[in-house]
Image: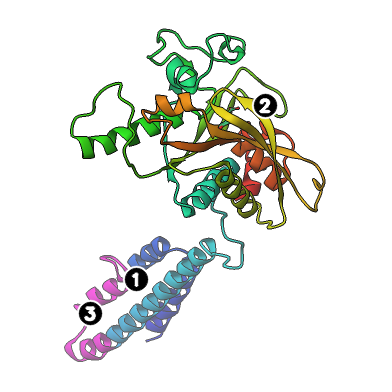
Amino acid sequence: MNDLTTVVDTARAAFEQAQTPAELENSKALFLGKSGRITELMKGLAALPVEEKKSRGAAINLVKQCVEAALNARRQALAERELQVQLQAEALDVTLPGRQRGMGGLHPVSLTLERIEAIFGSMGFEVAQGPEIESDWFNFTALNTPEDHPARSMHDTFYVEGGSEHAPNLLRTHTSPMQIRHAVQHVKKHRASVEGTVAEGVLFSGAMPEIRVIAPGRTYRVDSDATHSPMFHQCEGLWVGENVSFKDLKYVFTDFCRTFFENPDLVLRFRPSFFPFTEPSAEIDIQFPSGPLAGRWLEVAGSGQVHPNVIRNMGLDPERYIGFAFGMGPDRLTMLRYGVNDLRLFFDGDIRFLSQFR
Ligand code: DAH
């Protein structure tokens, strides 16, 4: 019987030594394999007399069970160890800070444009968009700008090849052409609905819903320094009706500025000026009652009563229709609102600057 106890002990020791499942399976073969120790013992039974066979066979079976139990125990231990190693290798430190998601944000000028649209929208103004490559007609001529006006020079305006008086030939220098484009469409649509066919060249003097629109967008001039960029933004405003006066301009624009800067004590000044498309014309200056800019007059827009020639180019009879227009600089409004002193920062695309406005 002694030899049998030894088998169990050696098997246990061999299994214990195995450090991996593969090693363990090799050790198993030594005992339970085809020519393993236990199989050999079984074969040895054949030579024994019947009586001995019985008891010896039972004893060997017991040994076999013990060896199998030891094998299974070791298998489980190794599997558990492997799992532990894997868990440790793949451990997550849930206390580490999360990975930052790069959240985008709107450009500060876009924020301003949204704000302008919301404020004027609340006053019943539509928002219109128009082409950045314009024709002489919309950019200058229809706006009552004389042939020899300096703004028309190559020195101030980017001209593009091709085009002509009535075909796109320049990058718009202001959003004012949208006054004409929008008004012409407005008048045409209205006339089509009341007159059926629209007689070309006949000014409209019937009744019509008012034109109330703003037109924000990109504009271009040959200009570049800390406060001028060759590409910049403007927002045009136009209100045309039968009884729209300079008083309305003052009210609307004052209300806009005070809302935009969230400052009901903001002071406005309408300073006489000249624009070909308005008569009379005024520059609009604002003054903050307190803060770093307090006491200084800051120009924010050009404005005026729409010139009768411009009203005509809209297809309207200036004897009946009158209104005001203004053109402001959203870039400048953004600089004033956030205290930025170099316009170029807006268009350099430096994320360190832009991300501050998220
Ligand atoms: N278009 C002018 C400019 O770019 C600004 C301007 C002035 C627009 C008077 C207007 C206006 O609508 O009435 O300097």
Dot 2, how many residues are within 10 Å of its Cα: few (below 14), some (14-19), or many (20+)?
Answer: some
Is 55 in the magenta?
yes
The residue segment tinted magenta is 32-58
Residue 56: image quadrant is: bottom left
Circle 1 — which element? helix
Spatial distance from mark 2 to mark 3, Cα to Cα? Answer: 107 Å
Q: Is mark 2 within 8 Å of ligand 1?
A: no
State the separation of the CA atoms marked 1 and 3: 16 Å
Residue at which label 3 appears? 45
Q: Is residue 98 left or right of residue 337?
A: left
Quarter of the image containing the N terminus? Answer: bottom left
Quarter-of-image position of residue 330: top right
Of residues 62 and 46, which is closer to you in this image?
62
- Foreground residue among 4 and 219: 219
Is residue 305 a member of the stretch shown in magenta? no
The x and y percentages for residue 343 are 68, 33
> Which circle marks residue 155 in the picture?
none
Amino acid residing under circle 2: His
Q: Are there few (<14), some (14-19), or many (20+) residues within 10 Å of tag 3? A: some
In the image: residue 104, left or right of residue 295: left
Which is more N-terminal, label 3 or label 1? Answer: 1
Amino acid type shown at disc 3: Leu
Residue at x 35%, y 68% (from the top left corner): 28
The single residue placed furthest to the front in the displayed view is 319
Label drawn at residue 228 = 2
SS of the residue under disc 3: helix
In the depicted structure, whether residue 56 falls above or below residue 43: below
Give x and y (percent) for residue 241. 43, 41
Q: Nearer the viewer, residue 65 or 330?
A: 330
Q: Is residue 236 visible?
A: no
Residue identifier under label 1: 31
Give the alpha-carbon distance from disc 2 to disc 1, as whole Å.
92 Å
